[in-house]
Image: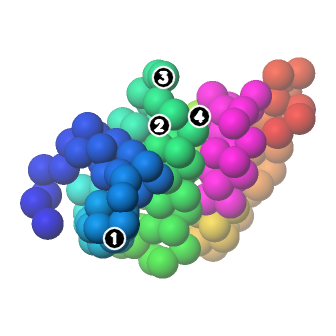
Amino acid sequence: MSAQITTEQVWQQVQLLYHGHDKQIADADRWLKDYQRTEGAWASLEQLLHTEGLNEETLFFAANTLKSKIVRGDLEQLDAKAQEALGGSLMAHIYKFRNGPMTVRKQLCLAFSSYAGEFDKIRSNIVEEVCKAMGSSPDTMPV
């Protein structure tokens, strides 16, 4: 798989996965599974989650893939600076989707909890930091 995957390509494959015919669905599923394991997926997933107007299916795919990459141990694909920045990025995405869709927010929260579990040895106060940040605004209390 090419390292230069565009967000448009990912979006097209997600659409085929959900709305294609049998062969298209199987091909899209295979393509997306291969994509999910690439190092380049980190950047394009970030771009997808920042893109306005995407459908819930694509946003769910992006959030779920972030969670899967963290759980699978793909964090080692990122350098130390990018690994640390990922926490802030996940929090920003959780805040962005605080009012929905719930399926996307749930995957992002699961991604963050897995991320926090990986970094609790380095930053033992990560959960406290999140509680302070999210608890200081009435907008984020339901999260």
Give the residue pinned by disc 1.
Answer: 26
Q: Which image quarter holds the N terminus?
A: bottom left
Within 10 Å of disc 3 (Cα), the crowding (few <14, some 14-19, many 20+) is: few
Pair 2/3: label in front: 3
Three-letter amino acid code at disc 4? Answer: Ala
Q: Amino acid at mark 1?
A: Ala
The residues bearing labels 3 and 4 have C-alpha atoms spaced at a distance of 17 Å
Q: Is residue 126 left or right of residue 9?
A: right
Q: CA distance from mark 2 to mark 1?
A: 25 Å
Are the residues at dot 3 and dot 4 in contact (C-beta closer than 8 Å)? no
Q: Tag 4: Cα neighbours inside 10 Å, few (<14), some, or many (≥20)?
A: some
Q: Which mark is residue 53?
A: 3
User: In this picture, is 63 found above or below 69?
Assistant: above
Kindly report which numbered mark, 4 or 1, lies closer to the viewer in this rendering.
1
Q: Which mark is residue 92?
A: 4
Write the residue at 45% across / 67% down. 69
Asked if the residue at tag 3 contacts the one at tag 2, i.e. Cβ–Cβ closer than 8 Å, the answer is: no
Answer with mark 4 or mark 1, whichever residue precedes in sequence: 1
Which label is found at residue 49? Answer: 2
Chain part drawn in magenta: 93-111
Q: Main secondary structure of the magenta part?
A: helix
Q: Residue at x 33, y 70 (%)?
A: 26
Lateral position of residue 67 relative to residue 31, left or right? right
Q: Amino acid at mark 2?
A: Leu
